[in-house]
Image (spheres, helix red, strand yellow):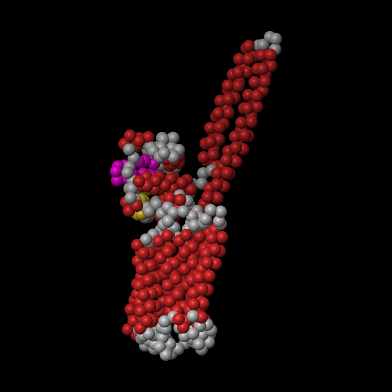
Amino acid sequence: MPEAEAGQDFPLIIATMPATARQRAIAVGIIIVLSVAAAAIAPFASIQLPQVNAFIPVLQTVVSVADLVTATLLFVQFSIQPQRALLALASGYIFSSSFAFLQTLAFPGAYAPAGLIGDANTAAWMFVLWHTTFPTAILVYALSKDVAGAATLPGRSTMTSIVTTVVCVLAVIAGLTWIVTAKTEYLPSFYTTDVRLQTRFGNQVNFALWLWVTTALAVLLFRRRTILDLWLIVTLLAWMPNFLVAALSSSVRFSIGWYAARGFVLIASCMVLAGLLIETTFLYSRLASAIILQRRERTNRLLSVDAVTAAIAHELRTPLGAITLNASTALSQLRSNTPELEEMDDILSDIEADSHRAGTIISSMLELTKKTTDRRSLTHVEDIARLVLRLLQYDLLINDVSVATEFQGDLPEVHLDDIQLQQVLVNLIKNAIDAMGSVTPEARRLRLTTGFDGHSTVLLSVQDSGPGIPIEDRERIFDPFFTTKSGGTGLGLAICFTVVANHGGKLRLVKSDSNGSIFEIAIPVGGQHLAE
């Protein structure tokens, strides 16, 4: 994945999001179901059924609309994160939508006995154009999706790129349509005297189309990485029965195989559309959760700052006023002709006492803040860990980090501020991701475990598979302003250590070697303090 993409958190598009194991399992399940259905229908594929003239108009109109909506959503994805590959793929869906609808207009018996446009051969050539342009667009997408650089030209907006692409695609569609409707006498024929019977040339063309789709599928399989790639693979596989029925049977139209193949086409046209809608909904859901959490945390911080500021201003007003009065009196004494040194001594003593009092007030305000902003409640540590993993799911995906959890379950509740523990865990996991940046993607493993010592302490550990922390740095890892990262501030682990300590617990580095590091959070049950 390009570095620019990996570095940004939002916006997110499924064209750059790696497919998870769960999504791959769902895709494999759908492929298995389609394969079983195709195998069950295959023995009966050549059996002729009654001609249903409304079948093609209804089905291919739905296919056309679904492909057009998919193209629109892909253009929206392009407007968020411009990539040439997305333009190519969106163009493919425009080709598919247009030729599916145009074939319906040319299909005999759909809207007219001989079709509204062209002749008996036009519908077949529309089928060829439909199933040539779409795999070509997917092939271009697969070959260009990892090319770095924006798709927009200098000085050109994404909207201009989209409009230019749509105009060019429509111009190509218009030209090809004119050829297969007005010039069919120059094109080879697909049918004999009966449109139900296909010539040998028709079988060969369908076999060639099957090879072309197989080529696009092979390239996509080799270069697959993202959720979008996964559903495109399912789409191409769902197209396969469409060619096999036409290539292996001379009796094509209105057979069981023909009707079933069109059903597979309908399923294929909805695959990417469903994937786009579902994943976009999930992305917006995660984005909304992150924004709500961020706003709540920011509000709490602002309220805390306002409260502390008001309290300090109120409490410091008295000692500062006394210091100002004593300083003015001292200046008056020094400017007089006969300053009274004994009185000066008393004034300076008062100033010193008031300054100490101001310092004490500031310290007490800090302690008061810890008490007044305490949002502690009984919480399950594992619930917080699961929430943090959901919040950081995108970071883990783009960094190719596999996650394993070993939660003991039935752990006693601990008394803590869940937001503060979330921040501690977020910091530890992000540190683990950074630590694993130098190892190969397949070796990046994050492991979260929980446990109970059987007495009074709940344990939560974060283990990475990075290169470990140098021996000379392990004793200083929690010191303020000490960092092993070039761009780090050295405050993250120090703050985490303090937050855990304020909850009566301990944050410690349990192990660190060439196989990785383990940080462990020990939290006492019931808000007790752990012994030193």
Which image quarter: residue 305?
Answer: top right
Residue 455, image x and y in percent? 35, 46
Q: Residue at x 65, y 27 (%)?
A: 321
Whether residue 512 is in magenta: the answer is yes
Q: Residue at x 49, y 55 (%)?
A: 150
Residues in magenta, as a range: 507-524
Residue 474, image x and y in percent? 34, 37
Query: What's the magenta bit mostly, secondary-structure-wise?
Result: strand
Residue 132, image x and y in percent? 42, 72
Which image quarter: residue 368?
Answer: top right
> Can residue 54 be seen in this snapshot?
no
Q: Quadrant of the C terminus?
A: top left
Q: Residue at x 33, y 78 (%)?
A: 39
Residue 261, image x and y in percent? 40, 79
- 333 versus 57 height, above or below: above
**Residue sticking out furthest to the left:** 514
Query: Observer-nearest residue: 478 or 322?
Result: 478
- 271 versus 200 height, above or below: above
Which image quarter: residue 143?
Answer: bottom left
